[in-house]
Structure formats: structure tokens, C-alpha cells
Image (cartoon, rainbow, N blue to C red):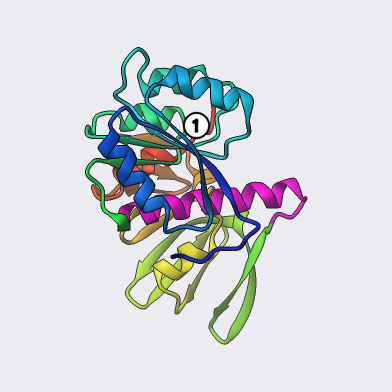
């Protein structure tokens, strides 16, 4: 069982009309102390009743269901909880992107992929709690060229992976430090920084435009890697409406 803080309990609802899919999600979720399954629903109408009556932090939502699809159901919610979509099809990524879902699991998915989705939910939940309590980290300390610099998250445009090193670009300069991309990802606020390529992490708030498989940032355009495209479009929210 994966140990988590007792303060982090995600009240979770599973919405799927397939018993086998429900059982897979239940089995995977049992390994997380951070997840408390409130109930199982086989259609969206049943789920609506539960969400109206009690607080839900996270839902695993199947897209293909009778009466009302997962996407249609999600559009009816005024203040939806965190959402992880589950489906056997891959052609709903853009709609998930527009609805700002947390993640997109394509059936059949492994425990490792489920773990990644839950970790996103935990990070988002922690951030929400920090905001509620007024605690919001704004910077980190980076060692570069025998000095330690305080770097504001808001100043970062993007990060480039260089093997055992990374280069952090800001509008005024750049810093090189011996962190891995994986470690840097762990240090950054996950709601603001997105991995778009094995070699690039971008600051969502610095994105000027997205066209095809390119992200435009101040002074540069970066490619969205094929392995990161679905995750990028399901996580990012519109910068301007």
C-alpha cells in the first residue's frame, strides 16, 4: 500500500457502466491511502445525485455511457471536482483539454499509468489546500556556477534538458544546474508547468499561442512531442477565453 499523509484524503467517485472497469479502478485505488471511494455509478444521472448531496474531490469518469456521455455530463457541472477521464478511445483528448480535465486514461491502462494520474490529483489537491490556507510557494533556490539563486516561478519561460543538466530560461537570462528533468518537474508547481517534450518543460502562463504541434513562447517556438501531446492537451486550460 502506498503511504500518504492522513490529511490528504480524496473523496472519490467512480462513474463507469462496465463492471470490469469498475473492478479495475477499485483494485488499483485500494493501494492508495489518499483515495476514499465514496461510491460507484453506472450512469451520469446517478452520479449527479451523489455530487449534489456530498462533497467529491475526484471522479474517474468513463466517456461512453448510456443516456448521457461522460463529456456531456461534465459540461452540466458548474463546479466540477478534479476529473480523470477513462475510455477505450483516443479521440476525445481535445474535448478533455477544453474541459480542463486532470488526466486521460486509455483502457486498458496499467497500474503505473493509474499511479501517474493519481499523483497529478494529489499534487493538484495539495495546491488547492495551500491556496485555501493562504500558502502559495512563489520561488525555489537553484545552484548554478558556484552560487545559489532564488528563482521566481513566474520568471521562468521554459526548461531545457541537457542530459545530467538542465538550462532554465527566463526573459533576462538563463541558469544551468545539475538537476534532472524528472527532479525539476517535482520541484515545479504542476498546475503551471507542463512537460511537452522529453527535453522541454514550459510555463503555462508564458504560452503565447499553440498551433498544430508547436508551442509559441517569448522568443521561441517548441515542438510538442508525440508522447506528450495527449497529456498536454488534457491538462492545459485556456489562457484567454
Is residue 87 in view?
A: yes
The verdict on residue 123 being magenta is yes
Q: Position of residue 86 (x, y in %)?
A: 33, 36
Camera sees residue 241: no
- Residue identifier under label 1: 238
Residues packed near mark 1 inside 10 Å, few (<14), some (14 to 19) or many (20 plus): few
At horizontal 77% and vertical 50% (from top left) the residue drawn is: 134
Locate the N terminus by quadrant.
Answer: bottom left
Say which of 181 and 125 sits in front.
125
Q: Quadrant of residue 111?
A: bottom left
Front residue of 95/31: it is: 31
Q: Is the residue 62 above or below the residue 134 in the image?
A: above
Count of marks overlaid on the render: 1
Q: Quadrant of residue 50?
A: top right
Query: Which quadrant is the C terminus positioned in?
Result: top right
Image position, residue 58 (x, y; %): 51, 40
Residue farthest toward the bottom in the current orientation of the protein: 146
Q: Residue at x 42, y 54 (%)?
A: 30
Give the prevailing secondary structure in the magenta stretch: helix
**Name of the residue lying farthest toward the right:** 134
100 with respect to 8 (left or right): left
Horizontal side of 113 relative to 143 (left or right) equals left
Q: Residue at x 49, y 61 (%)?
A: 169
Secondary structure at badge 1 equals loop
Residue at the spot x=51%, y=66% of the render?
3
- In the rendered image, residue 68, in percent from the top left (x then y), is placed at 37, 15
Q: In the rendered view, would you say 168 is above or below 134?
A: below
Q: x%, y% of residue 206?
A: 52, 45
Residue 140 left/right relative to 32: right
Q: Is 115 one of the magenta-colored residues?
A: yes
Span shown in magenta: 113-136
Amino acid at each position: 500500500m502506498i503511504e500518504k499523509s492522513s490529511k490528504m484524503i480524496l473523496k472519490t467517485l467512480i462513474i463507469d457502466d462496465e463492471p470490469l472497469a469498475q473492478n479495475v479502478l477499485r483494485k488499483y485505488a485500494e493501494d492508495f491511502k489518499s483515495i476514499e471511494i465514496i461510491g460507484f455509478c453506472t450512469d451520469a444521472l446517478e452520479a449527479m445525485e451523489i455530487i449534489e448531496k456530498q462533497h467529491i474531490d475526484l471522479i474517474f469518469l468513463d466517456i461512453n455511457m448510456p443516456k448521457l456521455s461522460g463529456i456531456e455530463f461534465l459540461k452540466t457541472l458548474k463546479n466540477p471536482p478534479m476529473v480523470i477521464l477513462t475510455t477505450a478511445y483516443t479521440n476525445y483528448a481535445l474535448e478533455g483539454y477544453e474541459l480542463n480535465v486532470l488526466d486521460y486514461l486509455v483502457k486498458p491502462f496499467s497500474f503505473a499509468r493509474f499511479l501517474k494520474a493519481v499523483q497529478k490529483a494529489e499534487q493538484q489537491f495539495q495546491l488547492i489546500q495551500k491556496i485555501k490556507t493562504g500558502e502559495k510557494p512563489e520561488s525555489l533556490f537553484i545552484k548554478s556556477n558556484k552560487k545559489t539563486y532564488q528563482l521566481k516561478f513566474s520568471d521562468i519561460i521554459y526548461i531545457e534538458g541537457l542530459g545530467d543538466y538542465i538550462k532554465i530560461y527566463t526573459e533576462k537570462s538563463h541558469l544551468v544546474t545539475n538537476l534532472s528533468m524528472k527532479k525539476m518537474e517535482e520541484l515545479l508547481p504542476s498546475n503551471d508547468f507542463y512537460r511537452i517534450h522529453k527535453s522541454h518543460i514550459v510555463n503555462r502562463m508564458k504560452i503565447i499561442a499553440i498551433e498544430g504541434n508547436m508551442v509559441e513562447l517569448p522568443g521561441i517556438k517548441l515542438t510538442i512531442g508525440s508522447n506528450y501531446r495527449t497529456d498536454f492537451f488534457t491538462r492545459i486550460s485556456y489562457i484567454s477565453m
